[in-house]
Image: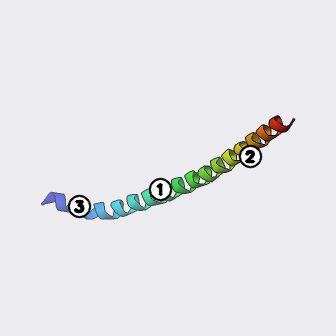
Amino acid sequence: MQWRKYGLRQPALSREKNLVLILLAILVALVLWNTFWWLVRLMLFVVIVYAIYQILKHYV
């Protein structure tokens, strides 16, 4: 019966732990989302510069 005494404190700790994990997951998702869009913009810039280079190489 002693395990029940320790079990009463665990849900509160578990809730705090879950809240911290959820906040961490949201933070990581936001960072990765911003990084993803930054990489997409960088890739788009590289593709445009390469296309301009190819066009200029063909005509010049």
- Residue 46 appears left or right of 11: right
Do labels 3 and 2 touch, CB within 8 Å? no
Q: Say which mark, if any, is on residue 7.
A: 3
- Residue 36 appears left or right of 16: right
Q: How crowded is mark 1: few (under 14 residues within 10 Å), some or many (20 or more)?
A: few
Q: Nearer the viewer, mark 3 or mark 2?
A: 2
Secondary structure under the numbered disc 1 in the rendered image: helix
**At which x and y percent is residue 22?**
44, 60
Residue 9 in the image: above or below residue 46: below
Q: Distance between the residues labelled 2 and 1?
A: 34 Å
Task: Count up the numbered dots.
Answer: 3
- Foreground residue among 21 and 30: 30
Q: Earlier in the sequence, mark 2 or mark 1?
A: 1
Q: Distance between the residues labelled 3 and 2?
A: 61 Å
| Residue depicted at x 45% and y 58% | 20
In the rendered image, the residue lying farthest to the right is: 60
Residue 55 in the image: above or below residue 14: above
Q: Which of marks 1 and 3 is nearer the N terminus?
A: 3
Q: Which of marks 3 and 2 is nearer the N terminus?
A: 3
Q: Quadrant of residue 59?
A: top right
Q: Quadrant of the N terminus?
A: bottom left
Q: Residues within 10 Å of mark 2 (few under 14, many from 20)?
A: few
| Residue depicted at x 81% and y 35% | 57
Do labels 2 and 1 touch, CB within 8 Å? no
Check disc 2 and give the amino acid type. Answer: Ile
- Foreground residue among 31 and 3: 31
**At which x and y percent is residue 25?**
47, 56
Secondary structure under the numbered disc 3 in the rendered image: helix
Residue linked to disc 2 = 48
Q: Say which mark, if any, is on residue 25.
A: 1
Check disc 3 and give the amino acid type. Answer: Gly
| Residue depicted at x 23% and y 59% | 6
